[in-house]
Image: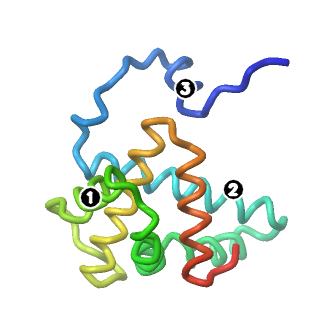
Amino acid sequence: MEESISLLKAIKNTFECKEQDIRAYSPLTLAYIGDAIYDLVIRSVVVERANRSNNDLHKKTIKYVKAEAQSRMIEALKEELTEEEEAVFKRGRNAKFHTSAKNASLGDYKRATGYEALLGYLYLTDQTDRLLFLVKRGIELVGMEL
């Protein structure tokens, strides 16, 4: 049986990416990739749950990807984070923003950015199991269903 590799490793291999020092990444860079990974996880689950119209898929997904929901999730997850994870979250939350929140309070936007930075960090350090655990657990802790 062929050994499976992570999506990240497959991308790095296919596009011949050089190894990077994750500690050199800005928190907003981590949040940038974390936002995409979180969106991919949520969209994947929504699609797997039911074949629906694009409009229905979007309506279901938006409840989970908006800043308010992410903010609630990371607040509920705080006790479950390692010291390293908490430090990454705080770096993301406290980053100097060059954009403003569109449909969220500043506090929710900052916490959501910290959450996305943490997810980006976990993705880029190939900690997929931990990333998926935190997303699933966050959803459970705030009483949402996917």
- Tell me which label, 3 or 1, sits earlier in the chain: 3
Q: What residue appears at the point 62 percent right and 75 percent down from the top-left corner?
A: 140
Picture coordinates of residue 100 (x, y %)?
23, 72
Residue 95 position by quadrant = bottom left
Picture coordinates of residue 124 (x, y %)?
43, 38
Foreground pick, 124 / 32 = 124
Neighbor class of circle 3 (other Cα within 10 Å; few <14, some 14-19, many 20+) is some
Looking at the picture, the colour scheme in use is rainbow
Q: What is the CA distance from the residue labelled 1 to the residue labelled 2? A: 25 Å
Vertical comparison of 8 with 116: above or below:
above
Vertical comparison of 10 with 94: above or below:
above
- Tell me which label, 2 or 3, sits earlier in the chain: 3
Q: Amino acid at mark 2?
A: Ser
Name the secondary structure under disc 2: helix
Depth check, mark 1 against mark 2: the one in front is 1
Q: Are marks 2 and 3 in contact (CB under 8 Å)?
A: no
Q: What residue appears at the point 70 percent right and 70 percent down from the top-left corner?
A: 57
Q: Amino acid at mark 1?
A: Gly
Which residue was labeled with disc 1? 92
- Tell me which label, 1 or 2, sits earlier in the chain: 2
Q: Are marks 1 and 2 in contact (CB under 8 Å)?
A: no
Q: What residue appears at the point 48 percent right and 52 percent down from the top-left corner?
A: 36
Picture coordinates of residue 146 (x, y %)?
70, 73
Neighbor class of circle 1 (other Cα within 10 Å; few <14, some 14-19, many 20+) is many
Residue 13 position by quadrant = top right
Depth check, mark 2 against mark 3: the one in front is 3
Q: Amino acid at mark 3?
A: Lys
Image quarter hosting the N terminus: top right
Which residue was labeled with disc 2? 44
Question: Which labelled disc corresponds to residue 143?
Answer: none
Which residue was labeled with disc 3? 9
Q: What residue appears at the point 50 percent right and 36 percent down from the top-left corner?
A: 126
